[in-house]
Image (cartoon, grey):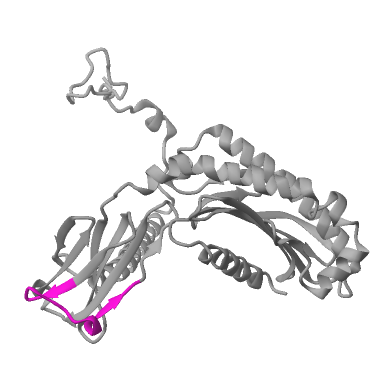
Amino acid sequence: MGLSRVWLFLDGLAFFVLLGNAAGSHSLLYNMTVLSQDGFAQSRFFAEGYLDGQAFLHYDHKKGRAEPRGRWAEKLAAETWETESTVLNATLKELRKLLAEILPLQEEKGGLHSLQETVGCNISEDSHPRGFRLLYFNEKLLLSCYPEPLGCALLQPSAQTLAMEMKPWDTDGFLSKPYQAHVQGELCGRLQAYLESWTGFMERTEPPAVNVTCRKDSEGMVYLTCKAFGFFPRIISVVWFRDEEPMSRDAQEFGDVLRDGNGTYYTWVTIRIPQGEEQRVKCIVEHSGNHSTHLPPLGKTLAHQSLWWIVSIPVAVVVIIGFCVYCYIKKKNTASATGRPEPIRLQDLDQCQTEPTDHNGLTHPEFQSSCQTPAPSV
């Protein structure tokens, strides 16, 4: 099992769980992963936290701490991150211990193995909080815990076999009632506390910043890209107009509206037109009542600017090297002609000093140059 497959699985797992949230509901979940290589647990611990589908927490394995992600999370008190770090570090120890118990029971002990836990709370439209927990080993569901009447279940035959060979989970492990109370009580309580500040944050409006770039291809066609970023909420309209009329959708390449990791969104739209027609088009952006018009940049395209730098830098380097070689050859020829090189007298360097000046460019009166003209001999 490759490491890249683990990351793809985690992304898909978070997306799958969040899809279950109906409109008007809220969710808090954590994805946590420990790995082993050739029977030995690795030191790295991966964890991400999501609130209503928005990433707000990242675990820094080097610092051993939970770190905020996004503008809302950065406003939370320091005590919040102390609590999150303490809980995640405790979970890390539990997952490593569980992984150490599972590995000896596997036929293939070599290679890469993963143990992943998704735990959190959902608040549905009826305002009733429900905690949940999913445990995966090598991307296969090992344990599923939901509120009553479903409870916890070992769905896979392989999971049932592991449960029989391992320590009883129903007494002191993850199937115990105290653990279910922890998931139901603490995590759901944390979700409700976060929602008090999260709701106001999500009701804000942030207009987009817009940037229009231009580049030219080898065929003489110009690509104009209108990028809007840093906006919230997600709904936005970015359309290219030509001669005051909106261009057809087939003539525009639309990017998805994506999260940028700090609680806002970004998107882009690109068109391809013949060079010389840039002044006939413009980009219109509409977002939450804000209306703005953006024209293509004047002057050279990015392709021309890039070419100028590519050509000018090597030329400058060649000129400098050629000048240095010329000076070296000239000095060498001069030394050969005189029979010996011109010596540099250190006393000349020591005696000649530059006169200090003030900020007006005037020489300080206290200074007297030490570079004196030698008096003529009598």
Residue lying furthest left in this view? 243
- Which residue is the extreme one toward the top? 366
Query: As drawn, is 203 to the left or to the right of 14?
Result: left
Q: Is residue 107 above or below residue 345?
A: below
| Left or right for 178, reference 48 | right
Whole-percent x and y of residue 24? 43, 56
**Where residue 286 sits in the image (x, y, percent)?**
20, 61
Identify the image quadrant of residue 313. Answer: bottom left
Q: Is residue 22 above or below residue 186?
A: below
Q: 18 or 64: which is nearer to us? A: 18
- Residue 167 visible in rendering: yes
- Count of marks placed on residues: 0
Can you say whether 133 is above or below 357 in the image?
Answer: below
**At which x and y percent is residue 188?**
60, 46
Q: Is residue 248 magenta?
A: yes
**As drawn, is 364 to the left or to the right of 330?**
left
Q: Quadrant of the N terminus?
A: bottom right
Whether residue 63 is visible here, answered yes or no, is: no
Q: Which residues are magenta?
A: 240-255
* Name of the residue lying farthest toward the bottom: 219
The residue closer to the viewer here, 133 or 226, is 133
Q: Picture coordinates of residue 346 (x, y %)?
A: 43, 33
Q: Is residue 12 magenta?
A: no
The answer to which of 21 and 58 lies nearer the viewer is: 21
Using the image, determine if residue 312 lies above or below residue 184. below
Q: Residue at x 26, y 81 (%)?
A: 217
In the picture, which quadrant includes the C terminus? top left
Q: Quadrant of residue 66?
A: top right
